[in-house]
């Protein structure tokens, strides 16, 4: 098994799994094992009971909501869970038997995109990638991705909001174009539905990115 260490993350590649996790998350789990054990238990209970989207379960001060689940009508193939605890808010995304290594590759893309943004900060200031904690793909092509949960609206929703001024929409659209210009050759899914806007800090936060080289027809 091959390990690639950086100050901020650990990349583990083996025959049966691929794993990338942040040092910060490792520390959170180490110091709060009971919290994450309870969250995993609640997610498992929802899964076993075939819960519907919107279902909420709690034990002590750990709250889990099934935010989204696979839907043939919409084409969604992902389970998304929102976890709230004293340690923060987390998103857990699960893709089962999905062959394109989504969990691991999404974490890898998040890391690489953030590095590219830092190198071109003068072109796309006030842009970040959502903070990822873990990306994991097992030998059965089950994928897990954990990141921070942000209670923000995506830019696509904002652009269709009639209460937002035309000037604000134009400004956001221009920033989106700049982001696409800088990142578009190396990453896919750079779209307004995959961009949160933080009005308090005037920041755009990207999520759901993947490296283009793995999806030549993407």
Image (cartoon, helix red, strand yellow):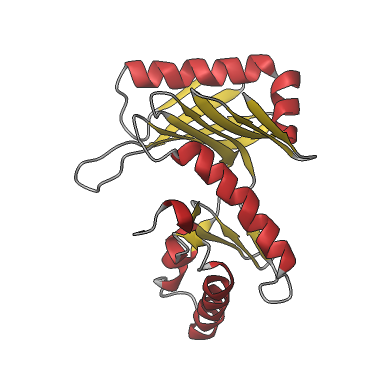
Q: Position of residue 126 (x, y in %)?
A: 69, 67
Up/down of 129 relative to 197, above or below: above
Q: Residue at x 30, y 30 (%)?
A: 52
Q: Residue at x 25, y 40 (%)?
A: 71
The residue nearer to you, when weighing 4 against 136, is: 4
Q: Is residue 160 left or right of residue 119?
A: left
Q: Position of residue 128 (x, y in %)?
A: 65, 59
Res 59 visible: no
The quadrant of the image that shows the C terminus is: bottom left
The residue nearer to you, when weighing 140 against 172, is: 140
Q: Residue at x 53, y 53 (%)?
A: 207
Q: Position of residue 32 (x, y in %)?
A: 71, 20
Up/down of 175 relative to 78, above or below: below
Direction left: furthest residue: 73
Q: Position of residue 203 (x, y in %)?
A: 65, 65
Q: Is residue 118 left or right of residue 166?
A: right
Res 206 visible: yes
């Amino acid at each position: 098994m091959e390990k690639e260490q950086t100050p901020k993350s650990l990349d583990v590649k083996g025959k049966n799994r691929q794993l990338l996790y942040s040092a910060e998350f490792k520390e959170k789990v180490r110091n709060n094992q009971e919290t994450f054990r309870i969250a995993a238990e609640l997610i498992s209970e929802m899964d076993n009971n075939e819960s519907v989207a919107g279902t909420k379960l709690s034990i002590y001060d750990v709250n889990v909501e099934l935010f989204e689940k696979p839907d043939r009508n919409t084409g969604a193939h992902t389970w998304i869970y929102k976890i709230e605890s004293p340690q923060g808010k987390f998103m857990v995304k699960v893709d089962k038997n999905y062959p394109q290594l989504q969990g691991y590759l999404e974490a890898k893309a998040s890391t690489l995109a953030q590095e590219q943004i830092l190198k071109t900060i003068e072109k796309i200031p006030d842009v970040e990638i959502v903070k990822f904690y873990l990306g994991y793909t097992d030998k059965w092509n089950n994928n897990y991705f954990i990141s921070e949960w942000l209670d923000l609206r995506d830019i696509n929703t904002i652009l269709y909001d009639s209460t937002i001024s035309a000037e604000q929409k134009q400004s956001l659209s221009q920033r989106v174009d700049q982001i696409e210009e800088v990142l578009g050759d190396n990453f896919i899914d750079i779209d307004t539905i995959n961009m949160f806007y933080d009005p308090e800090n005037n920041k755009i936060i990207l999520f759901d990115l993947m490296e283009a080289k793995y999806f030549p027809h993407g």
